[in-house]
Image (cartoon, helix red, strand yellow):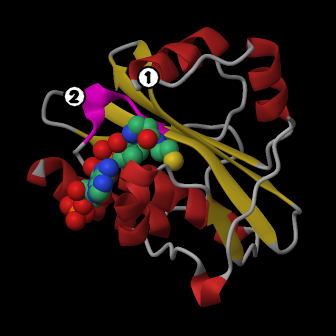
């Protein structure tokens, strides 16, 4: 675990000094001794079945793929995380954000495949999303945390109910 984390921290700093990748082009962020590479991508042409498999792996309820496709198309930002071994690519993480393109963005569907959890990759994914949103001058970043991941987000600087503000929901009857 320490190996992955220190490696990511080092390559994160290197990534920050590299020129920004063109939209959609995968940027290598990590290479292990075995030659496996971890990439981020902002390409929204994602195989929906592969994404569904990833979401299944963490036990999320299935959603209609046509709606998932629409949600991805209309998101402001999509960041996916890939493991590359030789010519093979595997989707191992995903997140997206909606936005008013000026002040606010909300992060949705943060997921890391269980095989890759606990290695600092969720944190890396979130940092990538935040970096991209900040680069668009978005300053108010919000999300809805499941109870079991509140601490994960708190570690990343997210606050619950700042100044007493409460998230409120409306659902159809
Ligand atoms: C939540 C999730 C994205 C975290 O990804 P991950 O790769 O396991 O997290 P990381 O290894 O990057 O952990 C980063 C830090 O958060 C901590 N952390 C991770 N998951 C945590 C949790 N559920 N509760 C509290 N802390 C957590 C880690 O201990 C680590 O702390 P450290 O930096 O002090 O060592 C991942 O567990 C996941 O996909 N869960 C299922 C889907 C889900 O619940 N998504 C969120 C929906 S709101």
Q: Nearer the viewer, residue 152 or 13?
A: 152
At 19% from the left and 48% from the top, the residue drawn is: 4
In the figure, is residue 109 to the left or right of 101?
Answer: left
Q: According to the image, label 1 marks what residue?
A: 59
Question: What span is colored magenta in the figure?
Answer: 111-117
Decide which of 67, 73 is in the foreground and name it.
Answer: 67
Nearest to the observer: residue 42 or residue 141: 141
Q: Is mark 2 within 8 Å of ligand 1?
A: no
Q: Is residue 58 above or below residue 41?
A: above
* Residue 132, numbered label: none
Q: Is residue 12 visible?
A: yes
Check mark 1 vs ligand 1: CB closer than 8 Å? yes or no. yes
Spot the residue most to the front: 173
In the picture as drawn, the residue positioned furthest to the bottom comes out as 163
Q: Position of residue 164 (x, y in %)?
A: 63, 85
Task: Report the Cα–Cα distance between label 1 and label 2.
Answer: 30 Å
């Amino acid at each position: 675990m320490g190996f992955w984390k220190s490696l990511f921290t080092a390559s994160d700093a290197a990534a920050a000094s590299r020129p920004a990748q063109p939209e959609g082009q995968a940027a290598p962020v990590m290479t292990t001794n075995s030659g496996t590479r971890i990439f981020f991508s902002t390409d929204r042409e994602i195989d929906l079945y592969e994404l569904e498999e990833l979401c299944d792996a963490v036990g999320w309820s299935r959603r209609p793929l046509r709606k998932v496709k629409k949600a991805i198309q209309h998101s402001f930002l999509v960041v996916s995380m890939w493991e590359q071994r030789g010519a093979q690519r595997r989707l191992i993480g995903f997140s997206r954000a909606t936005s008013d393109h000026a002040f606010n963005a909300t992060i949705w569907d943060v997921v890391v495949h269980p095989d890759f959890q606990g290695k600092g990759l969720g944190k890396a994914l979130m940092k990538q999303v935040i970096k991209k949103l900040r680069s668009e001058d978005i300053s108010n970043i919000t999300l809805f945390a499941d109870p079991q991941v509140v601490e994960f987000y708190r570690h990343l600087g997210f606050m619950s109910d700042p100044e007493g503000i409460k998230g409120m929901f409306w659902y159809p009857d």
